[in-house]
Image: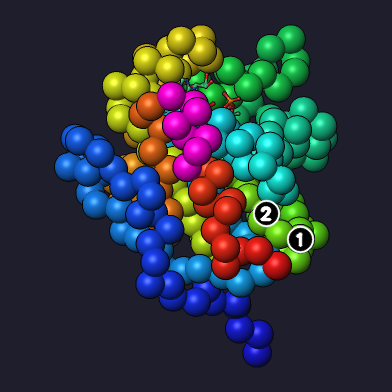
Amino acid sequence: MTLRRRPRLSAAGLCSGFRPTGGEERRYGPCPGPRASLRGSTTIGLTGGLGTGKSTVLKFFGSLGAKTWNADEVVRRELGANAALKRKIRNAFGEVCLRDGRLDKKKLAAEVFSSPGKVARLERLIHPIVKKKLAAFLRRNKKSGVAVAEVPLLFETDFYKLFDVTACVVASPAVRRKRLLRSHRFTPQDIARRVRHQMPLSRKSARCDMIIHNNGTKSQTYMQVKKIMEEETWKS
Ligand SMILES: CC(C)(COP(=O)(O)OP(=O)(O)OC[C@H]1O[C@@H](n2cnc3c(N)ncnc32)[C@H](O)[C@@H]1O)[C@@H](O)C(=O)NCCC(=O)NCCS
Ligand SMILES: Nc1ncnc2c1ncn2[C@@H]1O[C@H](COP(=O)(O)OP(=O)(O)OP(=O)(O)O)[C@@H](O)[C@H]1O
């Protein structure tokens, strides 16, 4: 029997340097503090709600020397290049997800996010591939310092079990909405439909070992990531 490496409990709060301020604490609940701190290398499962700033935070981790991996990017790559997956999606959803005979992500998103059953069907096709790639990334990097994987559906799936510690990026609904609309990637309806298919952010953050607050400027968020990377016990 193999035991999954369990993080050791630490008395000093990893979150203590960036506890929620003002209304955030009321909205999201108190920072839970660390469940864990590790000696040597560590793997971090990074999650958050739609538009909270997960990819921005992942880039900060990368710029500070962590090995990084992004589930959304893997999905995008697979949807572009995995012929068997594309065939299965065409068979499952038919013409509605095609443009000029080719798989179209915008049309696929419009189709699946209209119904929980359809999202679940798409996830059954894609998640096994994502999990395999994630496990391979963690195997390759588990001994090389800090390895961080951005997984939007960390707790909606059982992927959280693969990590030593978990971190949640939080921002208020109004800030997320403003940033997402400014990025021109989503309409208000796209946002509402996707958020409906995600676990509420308050529940996600309550389950995570660390919370990264991203209501402020990018440099304020960067400083929080820097603090996590400087955590003494993570240094080999
Ligand atoms: C429907 C698809 C093609 C739309 O692609 P698109 O480029 O518009 O979105 P992208 O992949 O960049 O996702 C952006 C965000 O949407 C949210 N999101 C994506 N998939 C889901 C889902 N199944 N349920 C809830 N939210 C989701 C996440 O917050 C994610 O960060 C794509 O999202 C997809 O294939 N989703 C199913 C796979 C999945 O579950 N991915 C998450 C892996 S953990
Ligand atoms: N602190 C910040 N200040 C200003 N803009 C920000 C901040 N953090 C993120 N953004 C911007 O908000 C948008 C969403 O951020 P990002 O893509 O990192 O979020 P995400 O959680 O990965 O989104 P998704 O759920 O769509 O994958 C981006 O345009 C990003 O540049």
Give me the disc on residue 144: 1
Q: Is residue 230 above or below residue 4?
A: above
Residue pictured at 68% horizontal, 37% vertical: 63
In the rendered structure, the answer to whether residue 131 lies left or right of residue 205 reads: right
Question: Does 223 appear in magenta?
Answer: yes
* Residue 83, position as x, y percentages in the image: 82, 35
Q: Quadrant of residue 9?
A: bottom left
Mark 1 surroundings: few (<14), some (14-19) or many (≥20) residues within 10 A: some
Q: If the image is split into quadrants, where does the N terminus sit?
A: bottom right
In the rendering, at what x and y percent does residue 13 appear? Answer: 38, 62
Task: Find the magenta span and give its range.
Answer: 217-224
Q: In the image, what residue type sits under mark 1?
A: Ser
Kind of residue indicated by mark 2: Ala
Residue occupied by mark 2: 147
Q: Residue 26: where, in percent of width, then height? A: 17, 42
Q: Residue 31 versus residue 199: which sits nearer the camera?
A: 31
Is label 2's Cβ within 8 Å of ligand 1?
no
Beta carbon at label 1 within 8 Å of ligand 1: no
Residue 139 position within the rendered picture, expressed as x and y whole percent measured from the top left: 76, 63
Residue ID at (52%, 35%): 222
Quarter in which the C terminus is drawn: bottom right
Magenta highlight on residue 6: no
Tell me if residue 77 can be seen: yes
Residue at the bottom extreme of this rendering: 1
Q: 131 or 87: which is nearer to us?
A: 131
Tell me if label 2 and label 1 are in contact, CB under 8 Å: yes
Against 7, residue 184 (above or below) is above
In the picture, measured across the screen, residue 222 lies left or right of residue 116, that is right
Residue 155 seen in this snapshot: no
At a point 39% along the width and 38% down the height, the residue shown is 213
